[in-house]
Image (cartoon, rainbow, N blue to C red):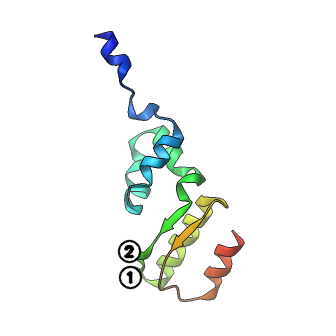
Amino acid sequence: MKEEQSEFRHWDELLPDVLGLIFTNLSLQELLTIIPCVCKSWRKTVGDPHCWQDIDLDEWSCRWQPHQLDRMLRMLVRRSNGSLCKLHVSGLKNDSIFSFVTEK
């Protein structure tokens, strides 16, 4: 019985890099609302900048008001902490958000 247990690892014990790779397959909504509530290690991992290197807001862009989109984009760019590599978004209404993204 003890041998069987040693073959398996609990989800909360996975290395942050592995979790980060898994999390890239999840939707933005899941990353923001579900993953942080699973356990402390998942909350910490999803808060790490490497989880926010690719931000895709295209799906949400058409459903949100411009001020909501602006606020969400600013929050996610801050989370990326300079590690942002790809940004997918449409419908931005002002130039200040472009300045913000390029400065961060």
Q: Position of residue 19 (x, y in %)?
A: 46, 43
- Residue 6, placed above or below residue 101: above
Q: Residues within 10 Å of mark 1 (few under 14, many from 20)?
A: few
The residue lying at 53 percent from left, 78 percent from top is 70
Q: Position of residue 59 (x, y in %)?
A: 38, 74
View extreme (right): residue: 103
View extreme (left): residue: 1
Locate the N terminus and report the quarter of the image it occupies.
Answer: top left
Residue holding disc 2: 59
> Along the horizontal axis of the image, is 46 left or right of 82?
left
- Residue 97, placed above or below residue 33: below
Choose top left, top right, bottom left or bottom right for residue 77.
bottom right
The image's mark for residue 45 is none
Which residue is at the front of the view, 16 or 77? 16
- Residue 22, placed above or below residue 28: above
Q: Position of residue 56 (x, y in %)?
A: 46, 69
Locate the C terminus and report the quarter of the image it occupies.
Answer: bottom right
- The secondary element bearing badge 1 is classed as loop
- Please name the amino acid that badge 1 sits on: Cys
- The secondary element bearing badge 2 is classed as helix
The residue lying at 61 percent from left, 63 percent from top is 84
> Along the horizontal axis of the image, is 2 left or right of 82?
left
- Please name the amino acid that badge 2 sits on: Glu
Choose top left, top right, bottom left or bottom right for residue 80.
bottom right
Q: Are marks 1 and 2 in contact (CB under 8 Å)?
A: yes
How many numbered markers are drawn?
2
Q: Residues within 10 Å of mark 2 (few under 14, many from 20)?
A: few
The residue lying at 53 percent from left, 89 percent from top is 93
Q: Position of residue 37 (x, y in %)?
A: 40, 46
Residue holding disc 1: 62
The residue lying at 52 percent from left, 45 percent from top is 45
